[in-house]
Image (tube, grey):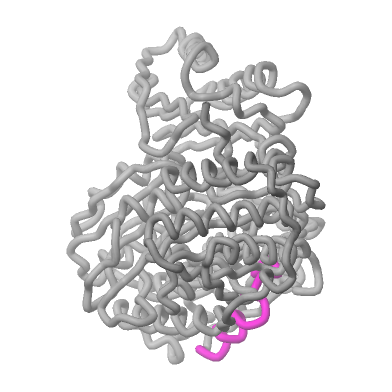
Amino acid sequence: MDRPILHGTDGIRGKVSASPDTDMEALQAIINQREVNGRAFMVIGEAIGKMLVEQLDRHPKVVICWDRRPGNAMLVSGLTDGLHSSSVRVIHGGVVGTPGLHDSVLGTKADAGLMVTASHNPYTDSGVKFFDSNGRKSMPNLERRIADLAWKIAEEGNNPEPDPESCLPDRMVNAERGHRSTLARRLDNMAETFGIDIENSNWAEILGVGQLLLDSSGGAATSWFAAGLNRRGIPTKEVSNEEKPLNEGCGAGEFSPTASWTWDEMKVSDHVLLKSLTELHASKPPVGSLLGAALDGDGDRCLLIEATENGACVIDGDRMADDIARAWDSIGIEKATMAFSIETDLSLTSADNRFEMDIDIIECAVGDRWISNQLATNFIESESWPSLIGAEDSGHLVLASPHPEIDNQWSLVGDGAATLILQLLVRATLFNNEKRVSSFQRGWKKRISVKGTDRTKWTGEGELADSVEKIIKNHFNKDQCSFSRKVIDGETSLLLLIGHVNEVLISIGIRNSGTEAKTNISIRAMSEIDGLDDLAYSISEYLKEVLVHSSSSES
């Protein structure tokens, strides 16, 4: 019987804890307690090294980067020691956002990269993401192989102690410098495509306010991103603080894609960006003004904050992708490709007839690795910036990025800083633009997370899935409704029902989180109909009863 896979949707994550005495206990802590430790990372590093040697038949080269979580030094040392035990050459890239590791892998011509982070999770958590030689996140077949090798190593029972010398890298590079260099090139590529003179644009008019507030979640971009935008003439102020814990009371991880607030709610909020906005704006800014932007802790996603009549709301990945398409269409781009996850607004994927350009829309599993895989399986050859978008409503936008070493070759990466830069240029392009088409009309969407679930019980199939489908059909008993199940490549625990209720297209998906002990319910509809909130509540109550001993759900 296969041992459990160690990876979730986006890497291995857990609370950083002390190492147990044996390799087996160390790996079991990831599965049973959702804890990561230095000993487990020694085993994982050794497993990754063995896998690479197996594939390449030579001594591989691996880059390790990390964010500033307090437990990361132990985990980086463990990975380095484990990789060395498999005859891997190890390069340390230092503290940087996840997009910086992508650039480092390509820039050093490494065989793989490891990013030590837990993204938007609390600072007490950490983990690791695996990137291949193309700077792409790992896929399930590779993660299965890593798990098999790691469990095999643990079962041998050698349980070595870390070697201080083996915990040191063979070489060091400045990954942040490389990331900033690539980001500057991306800005120039995008500005050239849209014909925007950044430094001579009237940003107060474009933004609708005199200054953009930036919340980098206390991550690597906190010390330089706002300053870089200011040098380009875009008035920006950083509000997060590197002296405070990563992600605590700040950043995109604290926001829901559908969140909105009144000014009074923002004034008493514990979130630094919301509170800072009320302190900056003594009078209400014009509706539609771009007030702020938030990155997550490892810098690979971004959400925007826009002024409403009575406060502010989140501009999510769906809206940002649509705005990019509108801007491309307005400048005469003839063809674009857009990839979306199964949690994307149904109205967006059905609204491409607004455009003059041809759009190829692709649906894929949740996770930016699946989006990248659907957009292109290898590097893209192009003399100009390719018109590709991959988006999740959480603020993950995958876009083409110039290869740091090879001209006219493009990789794909999710980068919150690049997303914000692009959104600023898109706003400038659409500002007073008579050729712009209207935004898509949002459908209805609700997501609930049932926390504390035993994820092994939910597979998306069998008796429990049948019971959920029965709840749904009984709920709409008096309406004209029809649903069928749909399979999405990469979603191993998904129950996805697509159908119509009184001719309104509806999608209902239930899937396990890949990073936390919770099971997510996502309901989407082309337009709001009565009873959808009640249905979401009924499903969540049933899942709590059958999957959780005692917990609460959170919308």
What residue appears at the point 79 percent right and 51 percent down from the top-left corner? 19
Residue 379 visible, this orientation: yes
In the image, 353 versus 514, the foreground residue is 514
Q: Is residue 476 above or below residue 450?
A: above
Q: Quadrant of the C terminus?
A: top right
Counting labels gives 0
Q: Which residues are magenta?
A: 215-232
Residue 337 point in image, percent of width and height: 27, 56
User: What residue is drawn where x is 62% and y is 57%?
Assistant: 119
User: Against 478, is 290 above or below?
Assistant: below
Q: Could you say which quadrant of the image residue 54 lies in?
A: bottom left
Tell me which residue sits at (52%, 72%) in the image. Answer: 89
Instruction: Give the left or right position of residue 102, taking residue 262 as reference.
Output: left
Q: Nearer the viewer, residue 373 or 81?
A: 81
Q: Which residue sits at x=70%, y=71%?
A: 281
Q: Is residue 27 toward the left or the right of residue 520 in the image?
A: right
Q: Position of residue 17 (x, y in %)?
A: 79, 51
Horizontal relation, residue 102 to residue 279: left or right: left
Where in the figure is residue 126, as x and y percent of width and height? 69, 56
Estimate the x, y position of residue 287 in percent, counting from the top left: 55, 62
Q: Main secondary structure of the magenta part?
A: helix
In magenta segment, residue 392: no
Q: Quadrant of residue 217?
A: bottom right
